[in-house]
Amino acid sequence: MHVISDTWFIAAQSSALRAKPLAVTIQGRPLVLFRSASGQATALTDRCPHRNVPLSMGVVRNGELECAYHGWRFDSAGTCVAVPGLVDGTVSLKSRCAETWATHEADGFVWVHSTPSVVPIAPPYVFSHVNDPAYTTVRRRFEVEASVHSVVENTLDVPHTAFLHGGLFRKAEKKNVIEVVVRRHPTFAEAEFIGEPRPTGLIGRLLAPRGGVVEHTDRFLLPSIAQVEYRLGEASHLLSTSVLTPISATRTVVYAVVTFRLPLPAWLVKPFVMPVAQRIFSQDAAVLSRQAEQFERFGGEKFTSTELDVLGPYVAKLLKQAASKEPAPEGVHEHRLKMKV
Amino acid sequence: MHVISDTWFIAAQSSALRAKPLAVTIQGRPLVLFRSASGQATALTDRCPHRNVPLSMGVVRNGELECAYHGWRFDSAGTCVAVPGLVDGTVSLKSRCAETWATHEADGFVWVHSTPSVVPIAPPYVFSHVNDPAYTTVRRRFEVEASVHSVVENTLDVPHTAFLHGGLFRKAEKKNVIEVVVRRHPTFAEAEFIGEPRPTGLIGRLLAPRGGVVEHTDRFLLPSIAQVEYRLGEASHLLSTSVLTPISATRTVVYAVVTFRLPLPAWLVKPFVMPVAQRIFSQDAAVLSRQAEQFERFGGEKFTSTELDVLGPYVAKLLKQAASKEPAPEGVHEHRLKMKV
Amino acid sequence: MHVISDTWFIAAQSSALRAKPLAVTIQGRPLVLFRSASGQATALTDRCPHRNVPLSMGVVRNGELECAYHGWRFDSAGTCVAVPGLVDGTVSLKSRCAETWATHEADGFVWVHSTPSVVPIAPPYVFSHVNDPAYTTVRRRFEVEASVHSVVENTLDVPHTAFLHGGLFRKAEKKNVIEVVVRRHPTFAEAEFIGEPRPTGLIGRLLAPRGGVVEHTDRFLLPSIAQVEYRLGEASHLLSTSVLTPISATRTVVYAVVTFRLPLPAWLVKPFVMPVAQRIFSQDAAVLSRQAEQFERFGGEKFTSTELDVLGPYVAKLLKQAASKEPAPEGVHEHRLKMKV
């Protein structure tokens, strides 16, 4: 797969990393996560330097990770601190170290840096409003058999909603012409939808009970964040941020963080919205895995885009730029188009 | 796989193609079949030009095929006739067309031409006697994990019947020496068995209750038709035509059409013959899939033939000639041999 | 896989080869075993020369193997002795012979030579004490998803026992320093453990109820024999010989022959030892299959050894030497080390 270096991906929810070591795969690299004695999340390459067994088969003892096969132990710096049975010589030789990956834990997620053995300069993405008491936040973890590119494009794509999710929140018979402003920045791209009517159907009625014009912006932020933002006057604000972790070229984990402030109480909204959101996700996951199969069957992808594919082509370009370490183009490119919704 | 172009294969039984689109694979190419408003069978490459999702996931609306993902619609010429949401520009651009494959529907089968985007000159094979009221016709569809070559050779092979199907219609102890005349024509080959006794066992008694000498001819017709013909005087005539569709190099669909006129009424014969035919087919399918596995395990095939393999080597040559587009050799080659049955 | 030629592997237990032909795979080569009329074990390549069907699908008739497809028959020399239906010409042509592999049956095992079509000079390995009435012998057959190298190293490795099999026969807290003498001979390697205390735990108490110093030697003998020998004075002697058959590069069959003479009666020892041995084997099999997966995930192995890996590196060198047909180095290399157990 095309590996993106010098960036951060979410490796796990904080709550999933407890006393046992946790095996995760990011960009094809098997890692093991564990907590040091002080509780700090640690990530090592999931391979014992001795006989290559996964360290995640082992146990954590006093904040050190012990291999299940011969009992070698590693501290949070990856240093080998025990070779049971050894009488002569130093234990902590460099050749016995496990490869380390920088971690950063915040707001319920353990992030791992995508380049091993470095001290990262910049911290990972910070979620907005998740600590604001006026907002309610819902988190979900999904797995999809598709590339990051396909999942991001799907998440930020407006026209498919009327068909794949027909009746759930947009309809096939399109009556309204809206304007879309698309901006390509050096490391992100966004589309602003102007004049979009209040969504019809169940979701629309819950989101904006008194009607009104929707402010709607979709964003893709490198390396793998898809964001959908809706505002409806002062009262309603919804920000859905999907942070994607590429497991392999065709498998992606989605960490979805939906933060909202609505005129209705959250306990009233959630029981209606959650099953619908789950059904939408299942429909998207199904079409995306079939799409990934098609690339396999036909020996690659062969897309024909229209101007309605407002962000997809930019997502592809930004991902390619990040994987190839090309310098980001300077300045902002903007164009406008009309779309029937 | 070795693709044969400019020919016809059966894609489906007519009865299998109804209101829903139907996914089929021929020579490794995924196709979608659907019926236009007039009921005409249509075949397109099973990939939406937009985001490559299988069109077979979609629905047929007024004889047009609508993609499940974004609702693009295609008519029976593969032309894109709808891009929902698009405001500016022409819908039916050439880059948005789906690749088409010519179809021909006759006698209960939908045939598809093996080269896309062409208007074929010659029609497909026509079945004999299927519309003759004096004949009864039985149709069956089977799938086998083997190449077209292996299935054809098996279907037209006489010596294996005494062993693989021991007791069902020929016996291991051979008492009769018969003569075989083998003829290789430019696009087909046939073997005529002279002096063959009335088959023993159950099938024999049903086929020729009064005994007599059998006229028996086996034929292979390019690209993939295996035919077995038996006559017994004026009263009995049986023509079994297996039209094979190569799904992949190691998977074949068999459309078997058995047409017969017998001294016994068909309703009396069928309950006895059908279970035996099913058992014979199961035994053949089992040995053929094991044979295909062997090619995989040993890195290819390595055959030793005897003169008893009367048609197999010609089948291989004809298939190779068709795949390589070599000109067919002129004239007819004939040779004779003796065989104990 | 790296094939070792001119040697012997166990193909099956004698008791597994009865009236039916038996399919086995050795170093990736599919073979069929059957018994001739005199009961002699015969091994042929498991592919009919005619249409390549596995001969193991067939039946044995009067000590000859009959192919299931067309009834060709082969004798114990691989000669084709029947082509049913053939009228003209000789049956037993050279091109119709099946490839043969020399066999040797002794002490309950059928061995097959690893080079086809040769008459071997040397016989296979002979088990010690299996026919001595003072000894009890237990035999077991296991399959492991790992290479011969990994299984042998695991079988002869001392330090892992305290961790992977923690509490079963060695403990993680190591108190005793012992000396190890390692000798590399031209076609085998061995490690002698001097000063090892009586094993603790259940096995220890059964093996040496009166305590004492253990004489313990581990050996690897080409091509694939791992041997563990324990003595405790005159009364106790245990010899565990694992003869490994490489099925493929990542699958190994272990034929374990444990022969022992103890101060306790065998009927008293076996009910205690067998479940423990089974549990140890399961733990080893689990870690070895995970290790084999790691080689796949990381694109190969990358080991860091310490002097505690007393035999593993020699096993690798001896296997490499055997596969590459390099001449064995002359003389004996010896070194000593200390180990905490």
Image: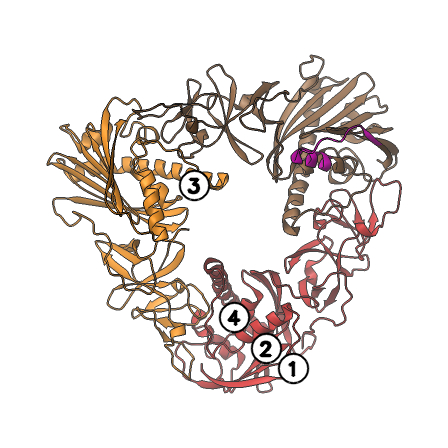
Chain colours: A brown, B red, C orange
Which residue is located at x 53 percent, y 82 percent? B208
Q: Residue furthest top?
A: A133
Query: What kind of residue is marked 2?
Result: Arg
Which residue is located at x 77 percent, y 33 percent? A169
Residue C292: numbered disc: 3
- Residue that mark 2 sits on: B219
Between marks 1 and 2 in the image, the one whose residue lies nearer the viewer: 1
* Residue C20 visible at all: no
A196 and B278: which is toward the camera: A196
Mark 3: which secondary structure?
Answer: helix
Distance between mark 4 and mark 1 Cα atoms:
27 Å
Above or below C19: residue A231: above
Residue B276 in the figure: left or right of residue B76? left
Query: What is the x, y in percent for residue B231?
Result: 57, 83
Residue B154: numbered disc: 4
Query: What is the x, y in percent for residue A224?
Result: 67, 30
Distance between mark 3 and mark 4 Cα atoms:
41 Å
Magenta region: which residues?
A315-334
Same-chain status of marks 4 and 2 = yes
The chain identifier of the residue carrying mark 3 reads C
Query: What kind of residue is marked 4?
Result: Asn
The chain identifier of the residue carrying mark 4 reads B
Label 1 Cα crowd, 10 Å radius (few <14 / some 14-19 / many 20+): few
Q: Earlier in the sequence, mark 4 or mark 1?
A: 4
- Residue that mark 1 sits on: B330
Same-chain status of marks 3 and 4 = no
